[in-house]
Image: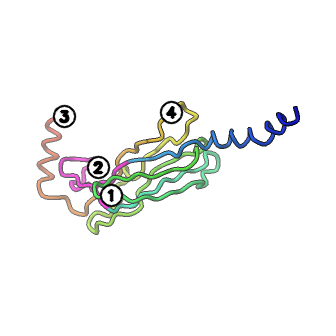
Amino acid sequence: MARLLLFALCVLPSLVSAWRMGNPFHVRGRVYCDTCQCGFETKKTTYISGATVRIECKDRTDLQLRYSMEGVTDSTGAYKIKVVGDQADRICHVVLVDSPLADCKTVHPVRNRAEVILTRSNGAISDLHYANSLGFVKDKALPGCAELVKKLLESDE
């Protein structure tokens, strides 16, 4: 009986803690240069290699930063960031940090962050989570953008 009690007091809490930690999450997304200054991805959009993004998780109560991890995009503008631990009581976003392109460094005012839910307490079973694409805006729109936007607007009618 004493061994069972000792097991319950010593081993079970560590098992519960390990279960709560679980596998790490992996957050994937892409970073683009809005070459037409449209505010969304188009045929003329390019994806940025070497852009820096950061996952920030803040406490829901006091909004203090509790977790932060940076990542860099690959040659296709994609990133994958590993997040260790369940962020159940936190609000998490992937945010733009930096673009290596001198003429595409302005952070888009709307596409500058994407919320990600990083908990298993909501029934999600996958370790892989996708974030919406994030964008920087090119200083000067590329030639042909006006025609592209006009064509897009006409197709909505």
Q: Does residue 98 appear left or right of residue 43 in this picture?
A: right
Q: How is the image coloured?
A: rainbow
Does the magenta segment cover residue 35?
yes
Distance from label 2 to label 1 (Cα)? 22 Å
Distance from label 1 to label 4 (Cα)? 27 Å
Residue denoted by label 3: 156
Of pointers 2 and 1, the one earlier in the residue sequence: 2
Of pointers 3 and 1, the one earlier in the residue sequence: 1
Outermost residue, right side: 2
Prevailing secondary structure class for the magenta stretch in the rendered image: loop
Residue denoted by label 2: 39
Residue denoted by label 1: 74
Number of the front mark, 3 or 4? 4
Q: Which numbered tag is attached to residue 138? A: none
Question: Could you tell me which secondary element the residue under label 1 belongs to?
Answer: loop
Question: Could you tell me which secondary element the residue under label 3 belongs to?
Answer: helix
Number of the front mark, 3 or 1? 1
CB of mark 1 within 8 Å of CB of mark 4?
no
Q: Does residue 32 appear left or right of residue 126 in this picture?
A: left
Question: Could you tell me which secondary element the residue under label 2 belongs to?
Answer: loop
